[in-house]
Image: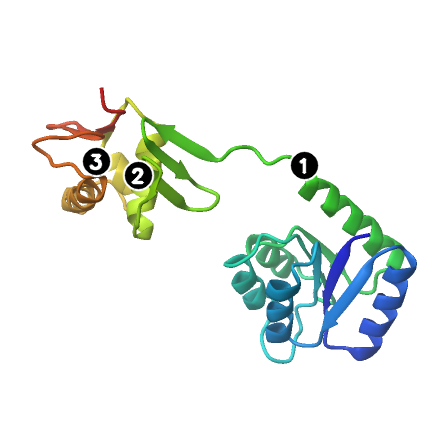
Amino acid sequence: MAHLLLIEDDATIRASLIRALGERGHATSSAPTAMAGLRAAVDERPDLVVLDLGLPDLDGRDMLRMLRAVSDVPVIVATARDEEPEMVGALDAGADDYVVKPYSADQLDARIRAVLRRAGEPKPDTAVTVGGLRIDLRTREATLDGAPLELAPKEFDLLHYLAVRAGEVVAKRELLTEVWRLPYGGADKTVDVHISWLRRKLGETAQEPRYLHTVRGVGVKLAAPE
């Protein structure tokens, strides 16, 4: 039996769906507002959330972004909004599926079962390991010899980009384009400053590098210590 959380402000729809989903073997709790739903998602740890976008206190897409910051629970958006930009926006915000009202209980149940099947599949390892350095893109966590590294967002992005290309010399212009999304010709100092900050956090210096090696006139290379 899956535990579902229904976030829907219409009391009639809530009651109807709770009854219909219960008949199909699901245990369903509910919340009438975005903030109540967010608290319930954190406290109850449901297997899946069914989310309406038209909530009275906060737009459902904003609530979804807040939820994604604290949980990877699967989410099906179930709403009357049928415009393509709304669908794309909800999926970009972290929804796993999108169904437009009116829909049947059987259709919603089928989508719930499909999303739960996908959620139950083993997730690929998203971590990159270089020597004692481990960087997990999915959780945005980095460790050095098992100890957590406190990295600013761009420091993490830069370290991950270099780690994926471990052993390669990466040009600063490429880093500015791919990590900072700046056009070619941006200020190389941006890269230099962030490399300096990373060195301190990795316990090394430019004179005695362990992981980060500057190739003068070419770029930066990340490699495991010899």
Measuring from the top left, give residue 33's x and y in whole percent: 65, 76
Residue 22 shown left or right of residue 129 in the figure: right
- Nearer the observer: mark 1 or 3; the answer is 1
Determine the secondary structure under disc 2. Answer: helix
Measuring from the top left, give residue 218's x and y in whole percent: 16, 27
> Which callout, 2 or 3, points at the residue further toward the start of the chain?
2
Is there a contact, CB below 8 Å, between mark 1 and mark 2? no
Residue 46 shown left or right of residue 167 in the figure: right
Amino acid type shown at disc 1: Glu
Q: List the residue tagged with mark 3.
A: 172
Q: Nearer the viewer, residue 50 or 1?
A: 1
Indicate the quadrant where residue 175 lies. Answer: top left
Distance of mark 1 from mark 2, alpha carbons?
Answer: 29 Å
Residue at (58% x, 58% y) in the render: 89
Q: Is residue 57 above or below residue 222?
A: below
| Residue 180 visible somewhere in the drawing | no
Measuring from the top left, give residue 25's x and y in whole percent: 88, 55
Determine the secondary structure under disc 1. Answer: loop
Outermost residue on the left side: it is 207
Q: List the residue tagged with mark 2.
A: 159
Q: List the residue tagged with mark 1.
A: 121
Measuring from the top left, give residue 95's x and y in whole percent: 63, 54
> Which callout, 1 or 3, points at the residue further toward the start of the chain?
1
Residue at (40% x, 45% y) in the render: 141
Q: Nearer the viewer, residue 204 or 154?
A: 204
